[in-house]
Amino acid sequence: MNTQVTSIEGETPSMAVVVAVAKAKGVDPLELEPLGEVIDPEALDRIFAE
């Protein structure tokens, strides 16, 4: 499976992950389990902070 997601300016990396996973699963992002159940979204955002 190959899914390409284009990030939106101002979108956090953690939100981009949510959108990409939802797109790959073919569901609405709100239907996913909270990202914080799987990874630390704040840490992910800090990794990619400018």
Image (cartoon, helix red, strand yellow):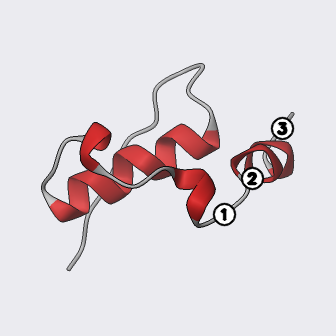
21 shown above or below 45: below
Q: Amino acid at mark 2?
A: Leu
20 shown above or below 45: below
Mark carried by residue 44: 2
Q: Residue at x 54, y 21 (%)?
A: 9
Q: Quadrant of the C terminus?
A: top right
Which mark is first along the chain, 3 or 1?
Answer: 1
State the image coordinates of residue 13 (x, y, percent, origin top left): 62, 43
The secondary structure type at the circle numbered 2 is helix
Query: Quick check: marks 1 and 3 in contact, CB under 8 Å?
Result: no
Q: Amino acid at mark 1?
A: Ile
Residue with the mark numbered 1: 39
The secondary structure type at the circle numbered 1 is loop
Query: Is 17 in front, or is 32?
Result: 32
The part of the image, by quadrant, that contains residue 3 is bottom left
Residue with the mark numbered 3: 49
State the image coordinates of residue 37 (x, y, percent, origin top left): 58, 61
Q: Left or right: 31 with respect to 19?
A: left
